[in-house]
Image: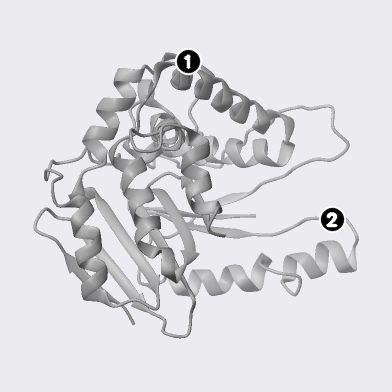
Amino acid sequence: MYKKTETDNGLRILTTNMPHTQSASIVLYVGAGSRYEIEQEAGISHFVEHMCFKGTPNRPTPKEISETIEGLGGVLNASTDRELTSYWCKVPMTHFRLALDVLADIVHEPLFDPLEVEKERQVILEELSMTYDVPSYRADLLIDEVMWPNQPLGRDVGGTRESVINITREMLMQYMHKQYTPPNLVVSVAGNIQHEQVVEDIDRHFRDRTRDEPSQWFPAEDEQFAPRISLERRKTEQAHICIGVKGLSSIHQDRYALDMLNAVLGEGMSSRLFVELREKQGLAYDVHSSITHLRDCGALMI
């Protein structure tokens, strides 16, 4: 059960009342991710997410942002994917308004200090390098490239070394101004809260934001008519094999049936893949399958 309100400037607010809880969880979703980026901007959604934690006029340093929440026993983090960037926070119920203030602060007023931009650029480059040091991560990226070549869906969400090196401070600010607009945001809250009061608290932080139109996402291009394969040789002790087949979108009527199939096939230690390959034959330590549902497509990965 949940309640939903859309404010005058297009912000959508969802709440779930959980009277038995002593904490509150807030998630702010933004329509920003690799599916919204042209090739020259690859990784910019992820870069913006990082910069939101690097200081605001009210909390000028990353330490002040994190300590405001963690000093209360709470947690604060964010992530970027193909279709969404999410900022989330969980705090004791009594500190709900402070947590909301911190989230609104970091997505409204990041400083984009030039020195911090350059410092964080190096951090992201290290993050990209990490995927080359972990073969299983690399296999996950290669299968995306094979299934969706030459389009945003097939790129690393973090971008490429070349694109990240060439993203400027001005590009970051323009992209954030374009995408972080109320019609492109959803705020969800769960806890011992009242919907009307939460809407009032959130609207206080967002009502002055203009209702601009964000950039749209790039649809999937499927021109595959034969099997594809990608091989990358590494001097490792194990082979990392990934098989991908086309799946279903997040609104397809059969998506729940596909989720059930995935559970039987390779999700958990009682799944057929795990029982056969690990328990019976002892061929692998790790074997599993997973489902991805996107707006207009999907995938089953083994």
Find the distance from the CA under tag 1 to the CA under tag 2: 37 Å
Left or right, 17 with respect to 65, comes to left
**Residue 174, quarter of the rendered image:** top left
Q: Residue 115: which disc?
A: none
The residue beneath circle 2 is 285
| Secondary element at image label 2 | loop
Q: Looking at the picture, how far across and down is residue 302, in whole percent? A: 65, 55
Q: Looking at the picture, how far across and down is residue 124, in whole percent? A: 55, 27
- Camera sees residue 220: no
Q: Looking at the picture, how far across and down is residue 14, in whole percent? A: 29, 68
Identify the residue at the far bottom of this view: 20
| Secondary element at image label 1 | helix
User: In the image, is residue 262 above or below residue 82?
Assistant: below
Camera-near label (1 vs 2) is: 1
Q: Looking at the picture, how far across and down is residue 300, in whole percent? A: 55, 57
Neighbor class of circle 2 (other Cα within 10 Å; few <14, some 14-19, many 20+) is few
Q: Residue 165: which disc?
A: 1
Q: Nearer the viewer, residue 255 or 42?
A: 42
Quarter containing the N terminus: bottom left
Among the two numbered marks 1 and 2 on one chain, the one whose residue lies closer to the N terminus: 1
User: In the image, is residue 105 above or below residue 8?
Assistant: above
Residue for point 73% across, 36% down: 135
